Image (spheres, rainbow, N blue to C red):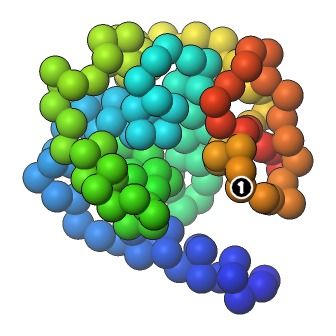
Amino acid sequence: MRRSNIFKHLVVVAALLCAPTPVQADDTLDLARVLVAEGGRTKTPDHVAILYVLQHRKRLPAFRQMSLAHVARAYSVAFNGRSRDPERALRMRTMTRDNIPVHILRLVSSWQNGQRPSNPCPGATHFASTTVRTPLRSVVCTQPTRNAFYGT
């Protein structure tokens, strides 16, 4: 494994070991915050696709015992300390329910109750900004997305 990859993995593990702050107490709210941080405020297929990626990650051995919100906090740069814009990351982490679009709150609530819309990016195991270079294989989404989605 290359040194840069080892460092990235260590950062994720360190984020997972960090104790949640009081802002992170509500899993529903934190999942919604992550969706806004990673997929934006407007209704896009990204929100559903991101939930599927997070659910995939939760099935990995290192994440099995964690809540989906914990996995989301570890994965999202706004929550795990890797953001290049700390002011925006703080705004994302401290959003109240009143600041989160209703469609995102409903999606998270439905998801937690087992109601899953179809996956707009089947096979995606990772997502990132479209400007990020990665050796992962691009996944073709059924609808246009804001982020790029990748599979292994």
49 is higher (above) or lower (below) than 113: below
Residue at screen point 52% across, 25% down = 47
2 is higher (above) or lower (below) than 69: below
Residue 142 screen position, x and y as percent: 79, 16
Residue 91 screen position, x and y as percent: 25, 45
How many numbered discs, if any?
A: 1
Check disc 1 and report the residue beneath it: 132
Asked if residue 111 can be seen in this view, the reply is yes
Q: Quadrant of the N terminus?
A: bottom right
Q: Residues within 10 Å of mark 1 (few under 14, many from 20)?
A: few
- The amino acid on which the numbered mark 1 sits, given as a three-letter code, is Val
In the displayed structure image, the side of residue 31 where residue 12 appears, left or right: right
4 is higher (above) or lower (below) than 114: below
Residue at screen point 51% across, 32% down = 39
Residue 106 screen position, x and y as percent: 35, 12
Question: Can you name the residue that lies furthest to the left here?
Answer: 22
Residue at screen point 49% across, 14% down = 43
Under circle 1, the secondary element is: loop
Q: Which residue is nearer to you in this view: 116 or 144?
A: 144
Q: Which residue is nearer to you in this view: 101 or 113?
A: 101
Q: Quadrant of residue 86?
A: bottom left
Asked if residue 114 can be seen in this view, the reply is no
Q: Quadrant of residue 119?
A: top right
Q: Quadrant of residue 56?
A: top right
Question: Can you name the residue that lies furthest to the bottom here?
Answer: 3
Residue 27 screen position, x and y as percent: 27, 37
